[in-house]
Image (cartoon, rainbow, N blue to C red):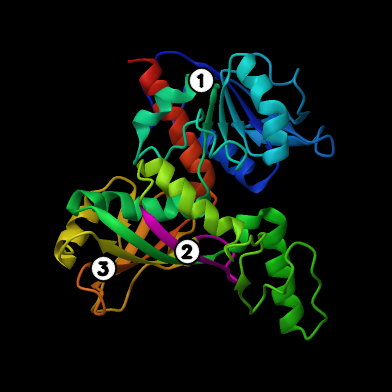
Amino acid sequence: MGVHLVSQYHVSIAGATGAVGTEFLRLLEERPFPLASLRLLASSRSAGKRLCFKGREIEVEELTERSIEGCDIAFFSAGGGRSKEFGPAAARAGAVVIDNSSAYRMDPDVPLVVPEVNPEDIAGYTRKGIIANPNCSTIIMLMALAPLRKLGRIKRVVVSTYQAASGAGASAMRELEEQTRQVLNNEPVTQEVFPHPIAFNLFSHNTKIDETGYNEEERKMIFESRKILHDDNLMITPTCIRVPVLRAHSESINVEFEGARPSVAQVLDTLASSPGVRVVNNVAENHFPMPLEATGRDETLVGRVRADLSNPNAIDLFVCGDQILKGAALNGFQIAEEWIRQRER
């Protein structure tokens, strides 16, 4: 819906040439936003490129401490290392930094925000000048999970993810396309981004596994969800899998309530009235959330809602969300909108 235009803001995008940075640029171009000026920043390799914005070309500058001076809002999507190196400098220069990396998510002095879930936490940004954008899988899960807290305390969550190539960036999407062409043409498969072939295959999420047996993606879902929901006792066990889908993550979620579970009708009604959620639950036509239909959509699609036949306190559901949109750029864009609203009240 955009924000009421009271002030105008100088905005920068760090990582402007990447998949998420490009989406930030599109959102700023297509949606109402009080934009005074826009600066596009990237690595030295991309400096000098020109990107089109509202009919004019903007030259991409190298990300340096000097290039981020004078900005009010700095979207960072250039990786954790860049966020750690330049994020604090941007904040010291007066910008609110909205960081899409994992660099600050678990920092107790940095709010971790999904605007539909915990917008009030944005006020804590003043401690460091930074607001963290959660992991894509966490956001997509919580869009479906958080509204269900109205129906009873959630005790335990079992989630399996089916994560698209888009989660690893534009180069990973190109690798999936290229490998698919290679397989169909009986050519040798080349690998650069993923550790295993992604075309016609799936494998455990390609992040480091620690001594507990959980990988980084799975740990993010556990600890980020607890922080966002302010519930350190919430039990979550994820299994994160990479699948040969170009864009939009899917998740199978089992939700166990502390007491008796709500009815399927109650769950569907609650989800249908939740901002940013679209219920896709056509049992008669066997039509439920699919990544193809979630791609390019703002809403998180939720369906396959049913009672868990093995547990009288649990329900099952299936979720799909665009990893680059709500799972990344759109959530960050909405954080900026909410930050402006709170600032101008």
Disc 3 packing (10 Å; few <14; some 14–19; many ≥20): many
Q: Which residue is mark 3?
A: 315
Disc 1 packing (10 Å; few <14; some 14–19; many ≥20): few
**Amino acid type at mark 2:** Pro
In this picture, residue 72 sits left or right of residue 183: left
Residue 78 in sight from this viewpoint: no
Q: Residue furthest bottom?
A: 186
Disc 2 packing (10 Å; few <14; some 14–19; many ≥20): many
Percent x, y of residue 211: 63, 62
Q: Which residue is mark 1?
A: 127
Q: Residue at image x 65%, y 27%?
A: 87
Mark 1 or mark 3, earlier in chain:
1
Percent x, y of residue 91: 61, 19
The residue segment tinted magenta is 234-248
Q: CA distance from mark 1 to mark 3?
A: 39 Å
**Amino acid type at mark 3:** Ile
Q: Residue 13, located in which quarter of the rendered image? A: top right
Mark 2 or mark 3, earlier in chain:
2
* Label 3 secondary element: strand
Q: CA distance from mark 2 to mark 3?
A: 16 Å
Percent x, y of residue 163: 55, 64
**Amino acid type at mark 1:** Arg
**Is residue 243 a member of the stretch shown in magenta?**
yes
Q: Which residue is mark 2?
A: 238
In this picture, residue 338 sits left or right of residue 209: left
Position of 78 relative to 143 (above/below) = above
Residue 68 in sight from this viewpoint: yes
Q: Residue at image x 66%, y 60%?
A: 207
Q: Residue at image x 36%, y 43%?
A: 229
